[in-house]
Image (cartoon, coloured by chain):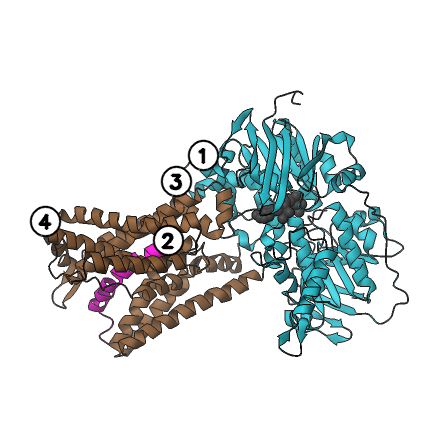
Chain colours: A cyan, B brown
Amino acid sequence: MAERNEAPVLEVRGIVKVFGGVTALDGVSMSLLPGRVHCLAGENGSGKSTLIKIISGVDTPDAGEILIDGEAMSGMTPARALRAGIQVIYQDFSLFPNLTVAENIVLPAAIASRKKLFNRARSRPGAQRIVDELGLTLDLDADVEKLSVADRQLTAICRALVQDARILFMDEPTTALTHSEVARLFGLVRKLQERGVAIVFVSHKLDEVLEVSHDITVLRSGQLVASGDAREYSVQSLTVAMTGRDVDTTRLVNDLGKRGAPLLEVSRLDLPGAFTDISFDLAPGEILGITGLLGSGRGEIVEALFGLLKPESGTVTVNGAALRPGSIRSSISAGIGYVPEDRLTQGLFLEKSIADNIIAGSLDSHARGKVVLSQKRIAETISTLFTRLRIKAPSVAAPVRSLSGGNAQRVVLAKWLATKPKILILNGPTVGVDVGSKNEILTILRDAAREGMGVIMISDDVPELVSICNRVLIVRRGSLVAEFDSEQIEAQRIQEVMAA
Amino acid sequence: MTLAQRMKTLAPRLVGANNEGVLAIIIVVLIIVMSLLSPSFFTVHTLFSIVRSALVPSILAIAVLLVIISGGIDVSFAAIAIFAAYTTVHLAQQGQFDPGIIGILLFACAIGAVLGFVNGAVIARFRLPTLIVTLATQGIFRGILLVYIGSRYIAQLPDSMAGLSTANLIAIDSSRSYLPLLVVPVAVIVLIVAWMLRRTMFGRGIYAIGGDTEAARRAGFPVVRFQIILYMMVGAIAAIGGLIHVILNRNANPQDIVGTELDVIAAVVLGGASIFGGRGSVLGTVLGVVLVQLINNSLLLMGVPTAWQRAAVGLLLVVGVGIQALSARRASRRTFVLDTVEA
Ligand SMILES: Nc1ncnc2c1ncn2[C@@H]1O[C@H](COP(=O)(O)OP(=O)(O)OP(=O)(O)O)[C@@H](O)[C@H]1O
Ligand SMILES: [Mg+2]
């Protein structure tokens, strides 16, 4: 264990960053000690990623200084930061979609060592070593754009770990990972920390954060509101520090009343290699949770419902009418909405404004007559959703790229709510969303369900499923293995069945 | 490994990362069809004349390929090529001296690099769209050439250049088939660029920038410097293309080359380079050039008017881009995640 009272490897003092009119950071200071894990906590848009990007030289601060080993660094650039031993796993991964996994992992290291030549074959073993060390099965020769979100995240993690970092920033590194992958990552984090690496960990999974961290810094709206020893915090008190209020997470489920005709019926859906013999139904107003480990086929099932995948056999009916298999258009016109897992690339037009994004999927329903759009109704929809989802941005005209990760997520949700779907399918709706907002999102879903919308929600977050779902289905190796209904739902038992 | 599995891993290799294999097959099919249609097609004479006509487009296409991989598009390369070549010849003629072929080459490349620098500096520093910038500079370069340097056709090349005009690598006098010596420098440049793209950090950096510029910056690539160097390199390569054109034609005409942009860009896109950036190969580009030249040549042989050749190339470009759009859509339908449940 590294000795205490060591000099900090990195210190930032009075960092200020203003984007346009928005103050993202307002005089934040933080110091990192070698061999300790530092938790950087805060709600969505509180400035965590911005602080990291300033330290890694991606953004330039408007005021304040960065000291490495007590020495002030002026004019930080990404290359200088890398050479100083700073490694970052960015929230958006920042990978090269067109290059292979192996190249993505080793290229930054090659730049940092000022190499002029590059040999793909000879750089492979280095990439293989880190992949093995983490016990992963990544195809090193696959292009990153062909990978699942989880594999992209793992690639980003490997890339940061392959170099000998002295300071490692992890900006929500576990959003797409399974429990076992998270466990292995934490194992490695401990090893690094014993080697004296200073680690900064950002995550909205607070129990996870508290499990690994020694020190804590909490930001709220760009200001430092608390810092200290992690042992003095519980999930509860950290939540209060982040949000400034208590967040109630008790189970609150809509009463369905007497079961009538189902809204959605899925019967014997089959797709070799993905899932087999899937049957279930969904009542109006019901919130159905689907969970299972990553790769269990849970994502493929809902993709088939939305027409992204074409099942080999089986039927899906909405209000008794069968959908055309593998047709997105047929699913949409039947009233199904789908919030995908990889929302930053699949769900949004990053350069367009929040308003454009919210309305993008529902222009048809805002038409007056056949062709003319009703500006008034469009504006109403946008402003209602903007306020209801509490999207943190200067105005609805701000481009989505300028939003924090969690706020971009809310825009996707707003876009789908604007379409007023009969059935809304969400794949990980609260990944990367802070505790306070998570509850708000769940409340929004609950309200929508109360008005008769059927909700199917895929989630890893068992407490979240418990707090909102009428029923929970568990998928293992492509089959439905268990169903918990209202009375039986209990976090402990769900976790047991999932891992069995 | 079963046969089926081997076939599965072999097939994508043959097709190539940028559909080079498909392109090669199309070329072979076209050659067979043309040979059946016209007995005079399948001869060494035709082969040599196609190679000869492909020399300048190959060099220019390599230059364009670099820009397209980096995520941009360049329409000023033709203006740079003729600017550099014509200015060099013009100065040599006016000064009544011949600096030798190496001197001429260096001088033309320097001019090309300076003009490329203008493009690169504006694009990298001000982050402007490359199409607009190069469209503007194309006009500017052409204007300066015609107004300040000369608009006259020069029929007399310096001796060192004129000598190269008639030098052949292979000459078969019986069938009057000649393969110009200039094939050698073109091949060398093509191979150097291919090596650079695969084996140097600069080359990989160009791919990285084309894939995601912000990610490249975060990974530590000096994006602005790389972009400026890239455009200077493109200018220099274009200048070489201009020189080769002048040598092959045995005269320097300031109105030449400009107007061939469509052929060149079409060849690069057909060669599998992605218009969205980040993808493309030298092999594919050369095959693309060969295909375009082959089609032009075939249409000529069949007596199709030249105006229709332009239309044909335009059509090819649409096909090329269409294939990209289709395969992009297919790729976005991802395959299943394997079931990696651990007990
Ligand atoms: N490039 C930019 N242009 C304009 N505003 C920006 C930009 N980047 C960040 N912001 C703003 O700065 C604030 C802080 O964003 P930041 O990404 O640091 O939040 P965060 O704490 O990482 O949130 P999350 O948990 O959602 O990832 C947000 O209000 C965001 O809208
Ligand atoms: Mg963030």
Q: Is residue B77 left or right of residue B4?
A: left
Q: Secondary structure at mark 1?
A: loop
Up-down: is A25 above or below A310?
above
- Establish whether labels 4 and 1 are both on one chain: no
Provide residue B156's location: percent of width, then percent of height. 10, 59
- As measured in the structure, the alpha-carbon distance from the residue carrying label 4 to the one carrying label 1 is 48 Å
- As measured in the structure, the alpha-carbon distance from the residue carrying label 2 to the one carrying label 1 is 25 Å
Q: Where is mark 3, residue-wise?
A: A117
The part of the image, by quadrant, that contains residue A424 is bottom right
Q: Where is mark 4, residue-wise?
A: B97
Q: Which quadrant, please, contains the N terminus of chain A?
A: top right
Residue occupying image coordinates x 63% and y 76%: A372
- Establish whether labels 3 and 2 are both on one chain: no
- As measured in the structure, the alpha-carbon distance from the residue carrying label 4 to the one carrying label 3 is 40 Å
Provide residue B179's location: percent of width, then percent of height. 19, 60
Mark 2 belongs to chain: B
Mark 4 belongs to chain: B
From the image, state whether disc 4 or disc 3 is nearer to you. 4
Residue B100 in view (yes/no) = yes
